[in-house]
Image (tube, helix red, strand yellow):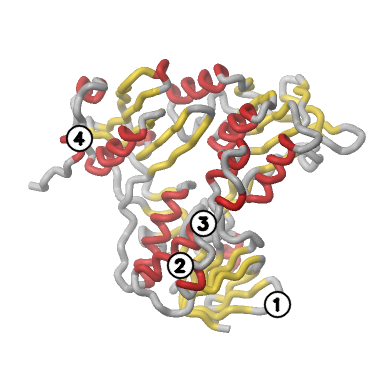
Amino acid sequence: MAAALVIVGASYAGVQLAAAAREQGFDAPIVLLGDETHAPYQRPPLSKGLLSGKTAVDQLALRGPGFYAEQNIDLRLGVRATALDLAAQRVQLADGSHLDYGWLALATGARCRPLDVPGATLQGVQQLRTLDDALAVQEAVSGSSRAKRACIVGGGFIGLEVAAALTAAGAQVTVLEGQTRLLARSFPEPMSDYMAEAHRQRGVALELGRGVEALLGNAAGHVESVLLDDGRLLACDLVVLGIGVLPNVELAEAAGIACAGGILVDACGRTSAPNVLAAGDVANMELPPVPGGPARLRLESIQAANDGARAAASVLAGQPQPLTAVPWFWSEQHDLKLQMTGLPAHGDETVLRGDMADDRFTLFYLRDGAVVAAHSVNRPAEHMLARKLVAVGAQIPADLLADPASDLKPFSIPRPRG
């Protein structure tokens, strides 16, 4: 069979690419391949509302039940692509069949990084990437043999969200992080310190700068303790791994498409191969030039997946629109709503607006006096304004930025270019 567009991957980037292609006037046949048997679903609730019981499985659908038929998108679930033939413009499938394409889009996402220690395959050791993963963790803390002590390996966003959800479910939770601070990849030290204290105050134990030597099980093959690199044993009946992800580049690499830390794409999602696009967690995308910033980055967020997919869809529509959006991200942990915009590593100065002790503040990051990023806690309106400030590179005196009573809205207006 042939299709004008074959999309491999049916999560956020794949679904958004198909939808955006239709919105932008691409009316030729689209086939959307998903290797899971579940219809495309929202992923953020997996480590938040689903585990805490606030969100039901039937609330997770990414699109309504009639969307794919209405948009003439041929959604195929439980279908895995195994090889690409770029010369023949063909996708080989696991069942031995194939699809010919005019355009190919790779939205293959990422998978959980494995923990390479003895005992990692014991019962009660879980990861959290898919709906099935989340349901297994949910069952572990709410089923008949409810887990009472959980160890979370990894102090990133997923690990901390799971820690918060399991604490709310009544489990005694310990987070194990190999770095000496939480969220070291994403946060500078002041925010890491704030998050560590916030979790401790809410009942989560932290073991920072500690590695895992092994997971030990009982006679039934179920995990019962974690051996740390200092020789201590932590008793537990549930381990959740949250040590990052690996981009699923294997299809692209085997076909000769350029990859380095992801599939290399330009600001419109074009790969090194003709008529092949990529978007989402697998795409290492060119970024708009920012002083002190990287030339490209593989961003792991829903917003980045959606924005990258829309940029790729613009190529299909014949009117390429490079990605220019400012990155943003959010996380819910306990009673804290974290919202982030920009890339704080670009900054050379920080300005605090509000009081961290009140759990309501924004930490701004500046470079040469311009706002390049912001982290907000329980300040959603200020986060929305911060996104505009970052987008225009607002120059704001530090004393005004630090004063919660000052009006920052005038600084969000784009300055005319002279």
Q: CA distance from mark 2 to mark 3?
A: 13 Å
- Residue 401, position in %: x, y? 24, 25
Element carrying mark 3: loop
Residue 169 higher or lower than 61, as above or below: above
Element carrying mark 4: helix
Query: Which residue was labeled with disc 3?
Result: 62
Residue at left offset 55%, top offset 49% = 43
- Residue 91, position in %: x, y? 59, 75
Q: Quadrant of residue 277?
A: bottom left
- Closest to the camera, between mark 2 and mark 3, is 3
Element carrying mark 1: loop
Query: Which residue was labeled with disc 4?
Result: 409
* Crowd tier of the residue under label 4, counting other residues whose Cα lies within 10 Å: few below 14, some 14–19, many 20 or above: few
Residue 18 tag number:
2
Q: Amino acid at mark 1?
A: Gly
Q: CA distance from mark 2 to mark 1?
A: 25 Å
Q: Residue furthest left?
A: 418
Going from N to C along the chain, the mark reached first, 2 or 3, is: 2
Residue at left offset 26%, top offset 34% = 371
* Crowd tier of the residue under label 3, counting other residues whose Cα lies within 10 Å: few below 14, some 14–19, many 20 or above: some
Going from N to C along the chain, the mark reached first, 1 or 3, is: 3
Please say whether residue 226 is visible from this viewpoint: no
Horizontal side, residue 403 vs residue 265: left or right: left
Q: CA distance from mark 1 to mark 4?
A: 58 Å
Going from N to C along the chain, the mark reached first, 1 or 4, is: 1
